Image (spheres, helix red, strand yellow):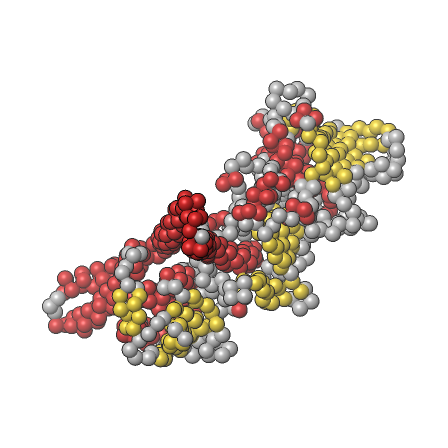
Amino acid sequence: MDDNRILKWRFDVSTFRLIGRDLITDRVTALFELVKNCYDANAQHVNVIFENVGAGKSQSVIRIEDDGYGMSFEDIRDKWMVIGTSSKRVNPYSPEPYHRKCVGEKGIGRFAVDKLGDNVSIITKKSGAEKWLKVDIDWSSYYQDSEDEYDLRLFTDIENAYSYRDASDLKVSGTKLVITSIREPWTKKEIEHLMREISKIVSPFANLSYPFKVRVVAPEFQIDKESIKTLEDFNNATLSLNVDYDVARKLQQSIYYDKEKNTFGYHLIPFKSFGGIKMRIYFFDESARRDYRKAFPNDPIDGFKVYRDGIIATPFAETNENPDQKRDILGVDKRLWQDIFSRISTREFLGVIEITKNGNPQIIDATNRQDFVDNEEYREMKKFIITQLNALQDYKVKMRSARRDNAQEGLQAASDDINSLVDAINDMVAQKPELKPAVEPLIKQVRKTGRSVKTAISEQKKALEDFTRKENIYMSIMSLQQFAINITHAVRTTLNQIRDRVEFFYRYYPNPDEEEWFTLYSKEMYERFKVLNRVINYMLSYSQSNLNPEEVDLKATFEEILSDYDDVFIREGILLHTDFPDKLVLNANRQFFRDILQNLIDNSVKAMTASNQKVIRCSYEVRNEILEILVSDTGVGIPREDREQVFALYYTTTEKQGGAGVGLYIVKTRVQSLGGSVAVVDSEFGEIGTTIKITIPFKK
């Protein structure tokens, strides 16, 4: 027995496999990791050379050569061959004059070589050294040991040979990784993919005093090209947006789109928990995407890349030939099914998100390099990023509507021009009847064309109406898909509550001793049925997309809806103020108004959960043939920077109070179906609460 009573951590070769082959997701990512290490070594030039790596080739080799500061024997022994070494954490910047922010701090990127081949030779030298140091590692010996259950040697027990050779130039420095016994053949397509990803390793907007250039060479595939991404890649963009921050004042810009002025603007908001970030977004409409594909046929538009201190952080260069299976770490494309007609997808923009180690310490690289650690700060950052895209989405919707209008106007203008042409010819014939035989065929052809244009106008109108109808149905289905879970739960819970009380009646009625319970349960069942009826009516409103308009008495309708909340208002201590003019009737869909007001009231109730004074004010009036509806509360309010985004599906400011981000989205779609618009405006209660303003065309 050991009297010292001390135990030390040790690990076998299975741990090595975990951080080598298993942790690095694929070969492209492995090479990408090794090239990043060259950046930390102050390299300006890196060559990635493939020799005989195609199928059926022998003596295959991959070389990664850089002109960085190289390593000494002590560096190899005490840093490179120490797992998780803290050298870059202790000294986070590379030596002067480069002074680069080191990006490989975890100390495991070097094990990426095991993903590529069984053998690696490290050939390295520092400036001034008289000899090159060569270290030979045979990864296969590690795996052989792991398969021998009687061999008790640990990973740290395995020895690796090293040697020296004379240097012809003492000033030269750098490191060469020579990887042999390549495990799998490479294709030209894979190498080209690697080149595309390596070109993104440095932010195209990074201001590097010393450049970082990577050349990929593969003679058997006729490849010899420098991989670099330049600002020219963004020249074809339809528009660009920049988001910045003020570190001294701790204020962050947040984009919004002003639909009335057709311009983008910025809110200045206090720093979020993740710190300040910079963003550059380049949006490509359909025409611009075609131009981009012609200019860069092998480099797709693929959304955001996140850079930390100018160097790629994530997503890393994970190989996947199917674009639909690529990682969507920021959740951009996950939103598409919610509104496929309007949402911005990663195929429509190129974006750069710039963070820093010091400014965003809680945005932490995941060990597999494919994402960040899922914490509150990262989730908050993703939410902020989506908010910026929502502004771009508003622009996209506006432009789509404008194109539709232009197409209609163009056809109508063509029809008017044809009519004018026919009138002009008729006038000419009236003045010179002898021309009639000559122009008669022309008049017939022009009139035929005019009829075709009128038919086209009619067909386009029908097609637009049909598209709008299908779009509304699609959006209803998509909303319902997620919301059905909550609806199902509400129905089941309500039925269970009613069932328990019905069972009580079945067992004990009539029993004078239980009369108090009979009275209470009767009232509760009545209230539960009212809730159930609301849920069912709401569901029916989705299935009856083409309900015929009817005369809607607004005052009676609003008072009826609000009366459903009498018990809620009493229970929550909410005061209700209303201002409803008499005899205001419009021809519309009654259920739409019910959906609008119910969801607004539900939101207000949730928003006032922690309020000391709870007041809801609901009013409407007609101004200049526009019906204006205001619903206000004294709740938590909506930050100014979120005003344009709160109507997006699943965007909520009352998550802690049970908000699911569906209510205001339903309000928006219902208002739009009535031909109106909805917005968050300055609160009627001043510094507290929220006011929602709805405007709908109305003629008395």
Determine the image quadrant of residue 602: bottom left
Task: Say above or below: 150 vs 682.
Answer: above
- Pinpoint residue 81: horizontal percent, then vertical percent: 71, 37
Image point (49%, 69%), residue name: 638
Instruction: Quarter of the image for the C terminus: give it.
Output: bottom left
> In the image, 338: left or right of 5?
left
Q: Considering depth in this image, is 75 or 523 the residue closer to the camera?
A: 523
Image point (55%, 58%), residue name: 388
Asked if residue 564 shows in the view, the reply is no
Image point (51%, 77%), residue name: 687
Task: Say above or below: 644 vs 439.
Answer: below
Q: Tag count in the figure?
A: 0
> In the image, 41: left or right of 487?
right
- Pinpoint residue 668: horizontal percent, then vertical percent: 41, 63
Instruction: Quarter of the image for the N terminus: give it.
Output: top right
Q: Residue furthest left?
A: 510
- Pinpoint residue 422: horizontal percent, then vertical percent: 43, 53
Asked if residue 6 shows in the view, the reply is yes
Q: Considering depth in this image, is 283 or 385 the residue closer to the camera?
A: 283
Task: Say above or below: 67 vs 680.
Answer: above
Q: Considering depth in this image, is 638 or 260 the residue closer to the camera?
A: 260
Determine the image quadrant of residue 174: top right
Image point (75%, 50%), residue name: 208
Task: Say above or below: 597 vs 244.
Answer: below
